Image (spheres, rainbow, N blue to C red):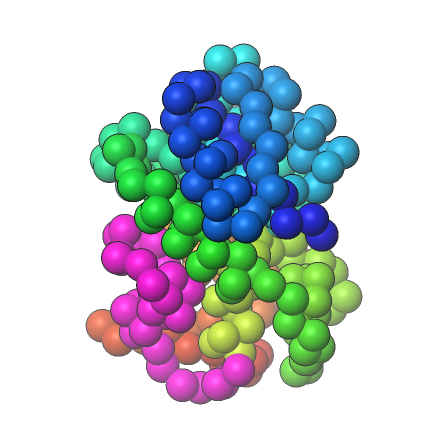
């Protein structure tokens, strides 16, 4: 995978500012200002991460994010103009890896890019229990041989819970694990990711419930078959 960060931003000044900061931080960057240009570029150049503005000419960030998720787990950081939008976007379960609200400091963006790349970096582990298999190199989780098509964040959460079966993790512990050097956006972030993972598991195996919520405490992994 390249180390190119794709900047999707229609405000030229902001796109340039992001490009400059990311180059100084050692990243290659590509930049587009129209939503219609994004998908072809993602397919042809396979960027390492995408900074995706929500409001764009041509096609909006929500549709772009959904479409990318049909074929790629590439990390996506969505950029929104209003903090309230983040909650709405979480509710839509787009599969974005992080959210940043304008106005932001370019330094903060670089830190977030690094954090997302770090947690989506290659992990050579290949583990399995019963009918669940996790391939850390390709972020691929399968149940009974069927791909769950998890996003990178969903994969990280599932494999973290899986690494300590039966242990209960609070939402805050999971947030710290998934967003290590960041302020909390919303504690619903974790609930939203967990909900997606469960939906994907029950989509391929309706009788399996690998992640259990523990009322008032958090979540745990348990591979027991539902009775
Ligand atoms: Ca915009």
- Residue 25 lies, with reference to residue 37, above or below; the image says below
- Residue 13 lies, with reference to residue 155, above or below; the image says above
- Residue 184 lies, with reference to residue 42, above or below; the image says below
List x then y, in percent, for residue 219. Answer: 37, 73
Examine the image and state in which quarter residue 155 appears: bottom right
Q: Name the residue located 70 percent from the left edge and 41 percent from the top edge.
A: 46
The reply to whether residue 172 is in sight is yes
Examine the image and state in which quarter residue 31 appears: top right
List x then y, in percent, for residue 166. Answer: 44, 86
The reply to whether residue 141 is in sight is no
Magenta residues, as a range?
Answer: 163-191
Q: Name the residue located 38 percent from the left edge and 45 percent from the top edge.
A: 109
List x then y, in percent, for residue 128. Answer: 68, 80
Left or right, 143 with reference to 221: right
Examine the image and state in which quarter residue 175 appears: bottom left
List x then y, in percent, for residue 126. Answer: 71, 77
- In front of the other: 170 or 118: 118
Instruction: Based on the picture, tell me whether residue 61 belongs to the magenta stretch.
Output: no
Q: Name the residue located 45 percent from the left edge and 59 percent from the top edge.
A: 115
- Residue 174 lies, with reference to residue 110, above or below; the image says below
Instruction: Based on the picture, tell me whether residue 179 belongs to the magenta stretch.
Output: yes
Of all residues, the one furthest to the top in this rendering is 58
- In front of the other: 227 or 125: 125
Number of numbered discs overlaid on the protein picture: 0
């Amino acid at each position: 995978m390249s180390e190119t960060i794709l900047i999707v931003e229609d405000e030229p000044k902001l796109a340039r500012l992001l490009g400059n900061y990311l180059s100084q931080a050692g990243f290659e960057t590509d930049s587009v200002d129209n939503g219609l240009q994004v998908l072809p570029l993602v397919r042809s150049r396979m960027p390492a991460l995408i900074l995706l503005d929500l409001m764009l000419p041509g096609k909006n960030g929500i549709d772009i994010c959904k479409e990318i998720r049909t074929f790629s787990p590439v990390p996506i950081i969505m950029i929104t103009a209003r903090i309230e939008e983040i909650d709405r976007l979480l509710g839509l379960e787009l599969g974005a890896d992080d959210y940043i609200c304008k106005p932001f400091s370019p330094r903060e963006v670089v830190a977030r890019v690094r954090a997302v790349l770090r947690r989506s970096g290659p992990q050579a582990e290949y583990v399995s229990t019963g009918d669940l298999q996790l391939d850390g190199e390709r972020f691929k989780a399968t149940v009974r041989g069927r791909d769950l098509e998890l996003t990178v964040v969903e994969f990280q959460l599932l494999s973290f819970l899986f690494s300590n079966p039966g242990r209960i993790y609070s939402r805050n512990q999971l947030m710290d694990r998934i967003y290590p050097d960041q302020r909390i956006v919303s504690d619903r972030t974790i609930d939203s990711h967990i909900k997606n993972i469960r939906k994907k598991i029950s989509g391929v195996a309706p009788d399996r419930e690998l992640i259990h919520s523990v009322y008032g405490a958090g979540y745990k992994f348990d591979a027991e078959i539902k009775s």
